[in-house]
Amino acid sequence: MENKANLKLTGRPFLPILAVFVVSSLFIVVARPVLAEGKFDYCVLLAGNILLFGVTAISFYLYSKALRNNNPHAFVRMMYSSLLVKMFACLLATLIYAWLAGRQVNRNGIFGCFGLYLLYTWLEVRVLMQLSKKSPKNV
């Protein structure tokens, strides 16, 4: 009988998330004129992308740590804490941006960041589901 704590999680599972960050950042920088035509502020999108990547990295770390833990209570705690960290960081960043920008808030940029949030979350869940299938089961 193997232990979930023996599961080795290297940096390799995180590579798809890193690839999405690099590709989306390059797209935002290269497609700046196209984004301007659609009234997307590239600074908002780039800052949102960086924030979402950082928060996703923290969340991914907590999720992967939860996968290695045999204690079901610790597993649930880690899962909820990673979810809350991600949600509150995004909410706080949006509120700070809205407060600083005042009436100049770029709604399209915020909606673009929301799309990036969905993309990062979907990819994170997909990778973690693959990892959970590979993890040894307690029988």
Image: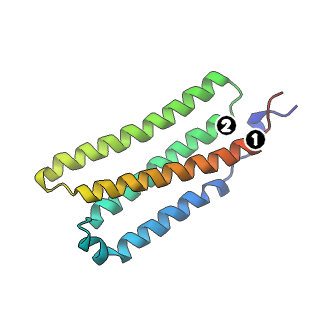
Packing grade of label 1 (10 A; few <14, some 14-19, many >=20) is: some
Query: As drawn, is 24 to the left or to the right of 17?
Result: left
Q: Which mark is residue 135?
A: 1
Q: Residue furthest front?
A: 38
Q: Measured from the top left, where is residue 13 in percent x and y? A: 65, 54
Counting every numbered tag in the picture gives 2
Q: Secondary structure at mark 2?
A: helix
Q: Measured from the top left, where is residue 72 in percent x and y? A: 66, 24
Residue closest to the eye, 74 or 137: 137
- Residue displayed at 54% across by 60% down: 18
Q: Measured from the top left, where is residue 76 in percent x and y? A: 58, 27
Instruction: Name the amino acid type tagged 2.
Output: Leu
Label 1, label 2: how many angstroms apart (C-alpha)?
8 Å
Q: Residue furthest top?
A: 73
Q: Which mark is residue 67?
A: 2
Q: Earlier in the sequence, mark 1 or mark 2?
A: 2
